[in-house]
Image: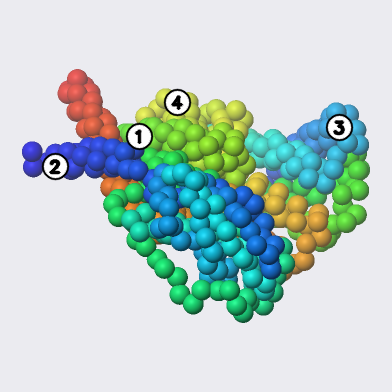
Amino acid sequence: MGKEVLNLLKLEAALDLRQRAAWGGMLLYVVSAVYVCHLAMKDALAGTAWNALFWIILLFAAFNALARSFQREDQGRQLYLYTMVHPRSVVLARALYNALTMAVLSLLSLLFYALFLGDEPLSRADLLQFVLAVVLGGIGFAAVLTLISAIAARAGNGIGLMAILGFPVILPMLLAVMRASQLALQGAPWSDAGLLFLALAALDVVTITLAWLLFPYLWRD
Amino acid sequence: MKHWWWKFLAVALVLAASITALRTPLAPAIVHVEPATLQPGTRHAIEVLGYRTQFVPNEVIAYIENGGQFVPAGRVDVIDDTHARIHMYVPEGLREDMSDLLVTAPGAGTMRLFDAFYNPVKGSGATHDIAAEMTVHHRKGFAFPNRNLLYETIRNLNFHVPMWFTMMMLQTVSLVFSILVLRSGAELHDRGAVAAVHASLLFAMMGLVTGSIWARATWGGWWTTDAKLNGAAVTVLIYLAYLVLRGSVTDRAKRARLAAIYNVFAYVLMLLFIMALPRMTASLHPGSGGNPAFSQYDLDSSLRPVFYAAVLGWMGIGAWLLNLRYRLARLEILQEDARIR
């Protein structure tokens, strides 16, 4: 199982390397979104609004990035994949790969966001906490959206359906990370934020476990 | 008859609970005091406004309670049924920030206005002018608790909360049907799951409407940002999305399986959300964010039996709705099978 997952992870990475445009697309999406916000908001952002806007951008970036997770392969290749490996390995590898992707993408988003919309709110923040919240949030989005993306792809109805299915289930995650990052921005002590981070990590684990449990029912036709 | 008794029971419970909820009078209570700040060590003349009270001259006794100490009033002038003036000396050394007002009279019972007065000067306990023992009268007759801010809206407890309980029950039934779909793939189970979701959405809408009216009356807005309310919104959105997902797949077996997977996934995440998160954030809603649930208001347990009857009754109505739709689905499946043969 572990080896299967590792091989599948390598396959994902190889596929992504082959289609470098996809990564470029994801990044460009974030940069454009950030720049639009920069043009619209100028410097009128206080801490809370700065935080909220960042998460909204990241949320949409996650939907955009993960929509292709199960949509890029055709039926034939899917069938081939599932005869070779256990479906649970497939979903675990996808979830882990997506988590990695989102962790990197959210850090890059933070970089661009701070560049264009100002890093003034970060000056009073516990930076380690904020980065941890961003990474955990990115992983959480990936955990939730992996299975949602698989369902939407199976239903044969692209990103529109994914947004409808994804928004309500991602809301708990979104509210929790927004709260965690807000606490980090206020420079809250670890004793306050620790429990929230633990809850976030637990939520990530539960979500991936659910995807792992449910996926075998999904791939069969 | 043997099989329908529970439907009669449900209707009877809902009718009985609803009529009782609307017709039971509120217990008499003190709703306003003036002034609301105490100056320890001075005499006070406190104007008191009652709701549904019948103050009788010479029978009304009043106390101020602060940190377990009772300060008796010197004299109570009754102006009319609902107005009285309390003359009293407030001793120095009261311990707590807030004091309660207690007004008691034979027949009317003891009325307590929680946190009636603010006490700007704190000490370590009054040493004189306190009552060793308090006179307590008990009210006769059945009445709902009459509490600050809630007043008459407390009746809504018997409508608002049962809706959410019933909704959660139906969603759990739908979850069980969805798990059965994943195990068996039977169409009947899928139809059962969607029937439960339809019924649960009806109760969710009723819960939202009753909640919104209640929020307007007590909090001043039709909708507020609150953990409990977010939970309700997420729940409704999830099940609407479930219906959209079903609508966008035409193949029946595939639709059943996809919908079941989404249902299980969303149900577990929703459960985590509405159980865990409200406890972490501040909330206005009773039963979350450190707020006690309604049991604290129900000092003499008069709400409890009506509330339980309402919950059981509405759950029965929900089960009836589900039962009807499930049987209809079974008939439709049978009819289709017959046509194919």
Q: Residue at x 71, y 55 (%)?
A: A180
User: Which SS class for mark 1?
Assistant: helix
Horizontal and vertical percent for residue A181?
A: 75, 53
Q: Which one is in front, B289 or A144?
A: B289
For marks 4 and 3, give the CA distance. Answer: 39 Å
Residue designated by label 2: B5
Residue designated by label 4: B247
Residue B149 falls left or right of residue A221: right
- Is residue B290 among what the camera can see? no
For marks 1 and 4, give the CA distance. Answer: 17 Å
The verdict on a common chain for dots 4 and 3 is no
Residue designated by label 1: B199
Residue depth check, mark 4 versus mark 2: number of the one nearer the observer: 2
For marks 3 and 2, give the CA distance. Answer: 64 Å
Q: Are marks 2 and 1 in contact (CB under 8 Å)?
A: no
Horizontal and vertical percent for residue B13?
A: 24, 42
Mark 2 burial class by Cα count in 10 Å: few <14, some 14-19, many 20+: few
What amino acid type should be assigned to the residue bearing mark 1?
A: Ala
What amino acid type should be assigned to the residue bearing mark 2?
A: Trp
Horizontal and vertical percent for residue B210?
A: 45, 35
Residue designated by label 3: A41
For marks 3 and 1, give the CA distance. Answer: 44 Å
Residue B168 falls left or right of residue B189: right
What amino acid type should be assigned to the residue bearing mark 3?
A: Met
What amino acid type should be assigned to the residue bearing mark 4?
A: Gly
The verdict on a common chain for dots 3 and 2 is no
Q: Which one is in front, A167 or B53?
A: B53
Q: Which mark is residue A82?
A: none
Q: Is residue A193 above or below residue A90?
A: below
Q: Residue at x 43, y 53 (%)?
A: B57
